[in-house]
Amino acid sequence: MVELPPFEHTNVESIAGIAGGVRKSFLAHKTRPLEFRIQQLRKLYWALNDSKDLITEACKKDLGKSSFETYLTEISWLMNDIVFMTTNLPRFAKDESPTDIALTNRLFAPKIRKDPLGTVLIIGAYNFPIQLSIGPLIGAIAAGCTAILKPSESSPHAAAVMQKMIAESLDPSCYTVIQGAIPETTALLDEKWDKIFYTGSAPVGTIIAKKAAETLTPVTLELGGKNPAIITKHADPRLAARRLLWAKTLNAGQVCVSQNFTLIDKDLVPAFIAEMKIQLKEFYPQGAQKSPDYGRIVNLRQFQRLKKMLDDSAGKIVVGGSMDESDLFIEPTVVQVPSMDDSLIRDESFGPLLPIIAVQDLDEAIKIANEVDGTPLGLYPFGNKAEMEKVLSQTRSGGASLNDGFFHASIPTMPFGGVGSSGQGAYRGKASFDVFTHRRSITKTPAWIEGMLDIRYPPYTDKKANK
Ligand code: NAD
């Protein structure tokens, strides 16, 4: 057993000084050289590698995560991101020659320089506590920013491991962790930032955006949403059940891109429910609670929130349904709900509850999906090619996986982000560099060109006007 570092709130009084220090380092141009950024990223890579056991233990304690899931969605995920970034950073950071430049303007050597935005604040969520905090940090380091990371206090063990890792591996004058909840985050928001990168719920996202607007600070908001899955009568019920069950059992359904509700053609409902029962048994032959592969709800507050959602629902539990408060366990639970006004549809469940609604046809499914949340984070249609294309052409969403649950979000080089109510801005792959970079347009006017420029100087004589 590894010994986890303690979680301690940062003293609120010290926050302004810490933020000022990190800003000073940026203004001293410490993070500008590419070699420095690559060196820091490599150090972070080895810190992750050396902290595998600590991270695994912390995620087990915070969320009951299996070591396989932690390796896949936190450790190897981030290490691969760093390898991608260090390999490609020289190319991303190079001056760019703009296209669509008229011949005469080429004389001014136009180029786009990739400037770091400055000093940035990264606020993380609890569900993938390491990935969602260090992921944006990789982009900030790559872009040449200095950064303060505020992990979620709801996953305190992971937050403490990150603080230790960052303090021991990175330059402390440029990158540091502030621990805490609302008072500490509020103190951080009182400071001036060049960007705030926030992952979490929409209500808190609104608080962040309002505060940032006071100082015209740009924000990236990675929020939640009420993601629909749509199953048409031409879909394979076994495949749909297996894939959607996976998407709601990974991290016990505490995944921002999981489907929040599933709209199923009425003729397929019995087959889908039967397949859900079979798949649940296949995933967890000894039952989900006894399985080492199934996680837990992060804390009592979230457990009670989910329990209330289920208690308030007018639906019928057709698969699962057991809960154990002492173990923060909620079984993957399929509920057939009568209407879209149900508690399980109205709010984001962010847990292993899988409401389903029977629909007459695809048109009704699309109509309901658009009414519940016109701009969810993800959307998951199952059906034939024409049906899936129809869904895409009549809806909006941050991303979409056709014939699957949130696969698009696992491709490391695709931009990931929401639209409308599910967020703004994107990261991962090159987008992680771009999101912390200012594209600075630069020209250089040669001395010899002065004769040609004469036309722009007053007095604007008739001769000039007629030229
Ligand atoms: P949360 O909004 O409760 O907390 C997120 C962060 O905000 C935490 O660091 C927290 O300390 C801080 N915070 C909370 N209240 C605050 C306040 N009043 N003022 C300032 N800061 C405050 O979110 P969560 O519970 O950690 O995560 C769940 C939500 O996040 C879900 O809605 C989920 O869909 C969303 N999420 C989105 C993504 C994404 O990438 N789009 C990823 C994970 C989670």
Image (cartoon, rainbow, N blue to C red):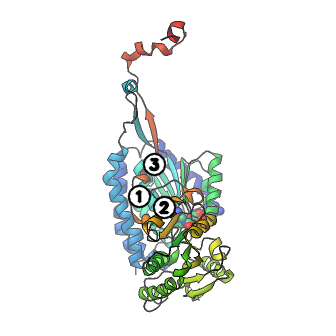
Looking at this view, is 129 or 147 the one in front? 129
Which callout, 2 or 1, points to the residue nearer the camera?
2
Q: Can you name the residue that lies furthest to the bottom here?
A: 286
N-terminal of the two: label 2 or label 1? 2
- Tell me the number on the disc at residue 399: 2
Q: Is residue 71 above or below residue 451?
A: below
Cα distance between the residues tagged 2 and 1: 10 Å
CB atoms of marks 2 and 1 within 8 Å:
yes
- Residue behind mark 3: 145
**Residue 418 in the image: x percent, y percent?**
53, 59
Q: Is residue 90 visible?
A: yes
Residue type at the position of mark 1: Met
Give the crowd class for mark 3: few <14, some 14-19, many >=20 residues within 10 Å: many
Looking at this view, is 394 or 61 the one in front? 394
N-terminal of the two: label 3 or label 1? 3
Residue type at the position of mark 2: Gly
**Residue 466 in the image: x percent, y percent?**
51, 10
Residue type at the position of mark 3: Cys
Which quadrant of the view contains residue 216?
Answer: top right
Which callout, 3 or 1, points to the residue nearer the camera?
1
Q: Quadrant of ligand 1?
A: bottom right
